[in-house]
Image (spheres, rainbow, N blue to C red):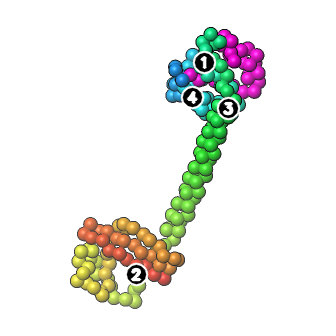
């Protein structure tokens, strides 16, 4: 425990060899604006670990002003804070790996989508261009519809359901075999 308003010199010298020193104060500290110095302490010990890493010695508000303004963070509390800090780092690493994996999957999906070409069978009669709302009267006829894809659902490798929109309605299309 500190016996003056500052941290003991022996502890400061030992800390400068091991790592850095940070001050935290529940009363006057700020995690956003603080820098961990005595004049601008952090509010929480966790922020000290975030800024300085695991090799940091943390001083907190002294419980008794007669013994000193700062005292060393207890070992139990330091262990809890270090565990939370390690959990945060692990979660950040997992999130970064997941985002990288998702990005690679999106690139692969885009590459596969570029390979798909829709061709018109020339052996069949020419298709009429119609809006979706006019398709009810053309049941069984060959038609061509322009629109945008509202939803895609794949069923295996050779079957795909596409919901198209053109401003006049929705149309479910089924693509099978050669897409």
Q: What whole-number distance in Å separates the C-alpha atoms at marks 4 and 2?
A: 67 Å
**Helix, strand, or loop for circle 1?**
loop
**Numbered disc in front, either 4 or 3:** 3
Q: Is residue 134 above or below residue 57?
A: below
Q: Foreground: 116 or 73?
A: 73
Q: Residue at x 31, y 68 (%)?
A: 165
Q: Is residue 44 left or right of residue 116?
A: right
The segment highlighted magenta reads: 1-25
CA–CA distance in space, label 1 to label 4: 16 Å
Asked if the residue at tag 3 contacts the one at tag 4, i.e. Cβ–Cβ closer than 8 Å, the answer is: no
Q: Nearer the viewer, mark 4 or mark 2?
A: 4
- Residue 31 percent location from the top left of the image: 53, 28
Tell me where residue 18 sits by quadrant.
Answer: top right
Residue at coordinates 39% horizontally, 67% vertically from top-left? 151
Between circles 2 and 3, the one closer to the viewer is: 3
Dot placed on the residue nearer the N-terminal end, 1 or 4: 4
The residue to which callout 4 is attached is: 44
Count of marks, rendered view = 4
Asked whether residue 147 is in view, the answer is: no
Dot label at residue 76: 3
Relative image position of residue 88 (x, y in whole percent): 60, 42
Q: Nearer the viewer, residue 26 or 139?
A: 26
Residue 1 appears in view: yes
Distance in Å between CA atoms under marks 2 and 1: 82 Å
Residue 102 spot, x, y in % from top left: 55, 57
- Mark 2 secondary-structure assignment: loop
In the picture of the structure, the residue carrying the numbered disc 1 is 63
Q: CA distance from mark 3 to mark 1?
A: 16 Å
> Foreground residue, 80 or 117?
80
Q: SS of the residue at dot 3?
A: helix
Precedes in sequence: disc 2 or disc 3: 3
User: On residue 120, which mark appears?
Assistant: 2
């Amino acid at each position: 425990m500190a016996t003056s308003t500052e941290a003991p010199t022996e502890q400061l010298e030992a800390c400068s060899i091991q790592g850095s020193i940070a001050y935290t104060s529940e009363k006057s500290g700020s995690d956003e604006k603080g820098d961990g110095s005595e004049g601008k302490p952090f509010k929480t010990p966790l922020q000290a670990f975030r800024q300085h890493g695991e090799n940091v010695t943390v001083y907190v508000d002294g419980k008794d002003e007669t013994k000193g303004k700062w005292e060393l963070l207890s070992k139990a509390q330091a262990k809890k804070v270090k565990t939370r800090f390690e959990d945060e780092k692990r979660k950040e690493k997992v999130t970064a790996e997941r985002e990288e994996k998702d990005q690679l999957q999106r690139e692969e999906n885009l590459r596969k989508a570029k390979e798909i070409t829709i061709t018109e069978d020339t052996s069949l009669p020419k298709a009429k261009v119609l809006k979706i709302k006019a398709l009810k009267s053309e049941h069984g006829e060959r038609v061509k519809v322009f629109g945008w894809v509202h939803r895609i659902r794949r069923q295996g490798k050779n079957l795909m359901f596409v919901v198209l929109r053109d401003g006049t309605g929705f149309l479910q299309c089924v693509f099978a075999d050669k897409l």
